[in-house]
Image (spheres, rainbow, N blue to C red):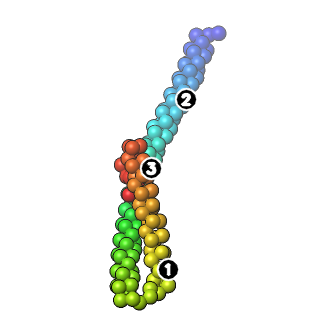
Amino acid sequence: MTGLALAQSSLTGVITSATGIVTVIGLCVTIVLGYLQIRKVRSESMTTGRAVNDQLSTIHTLVNSTLTASIESDLDATRLALVTMRALVTELESVGKPVPPETVAAMTGAETKIEHLTQQMADRLVSAESVLSQGSLNPVT
């Protein structure tokens, strides 16, 4: 093999080796860029997930707060109606008039409803205490 042929052969080997190295470097760069893209997407997903969870917690708190207020209002109105019916019964009995059966039935229904609503409020309180004891920032109220 002549010196020129040897030089060409060596140069071809170097070029082939350099091409292989460039290819490997290119693959490494592609892998690193892909990894960075995955991390970016993951970070964005986590941020979006946190935002959605925060919004859901806010909605949950608002709904529970509104429901509690509604139950309390219903309970207050039912108690007031029962007090009024009891006053009517007392007045009717004091003048010797019979108490209409509808009034007695309405009083019984009001008493049952008061018991039910009072239990609902107690259950909500237990639930709120449980959530708070678990460290949640948005208790069921």
Q: Name the residue under label 3.
A: 49
Amino acid type at circle 1 is Ala
Query: Which residue is pictured at 38% across the width and 47% down the height?
Result: 132
Q: Nearer the viewer, residue 1 or 68?
A: 68
Q: Name the residue under label 2.
A: 23
Indicate left or right for 135 with 30 as reference: left
**Res 40 quadrant in image:** top left
Q: Which of marks 3 and 2 is nearer the N terminus?
A: 2
Q: Nearer the viewer, residue 110 or 18?
A: 110
Query: Which residue is pictured at 41% across the width and 90% down the height?
Result: 97
Query: Which residue is pictured at 44% across the width and 49% down the height?
Result: 49
Is residue 15 visible in the rendered image? The answer is no
Q: Mark 1 points at which residue?
A: 105
Query: Which residue is pictured at 45% across the width and 77% down the height?
Result: 107
Q: Which of marks 3 and 1 is nearer the N terminus?
A: 3
C-alpha distance separating marks 3 and 2: 38 Å
Indicate left or right for 66 with 18 as reference: left
Looking at the rendered image, the disc whose residue lies closer to the viewer, 3 or 2, is 3
Secondary structure beneath label 3:
helix
C-alpha distance separating marks 3 and 1: 53 Å
Q: Nearer the viewer, residue 23 or 127?
A: 127
Amino acid type at circle 2 is Thr
Is residue 98 visible in the rendered image? The answer is yes
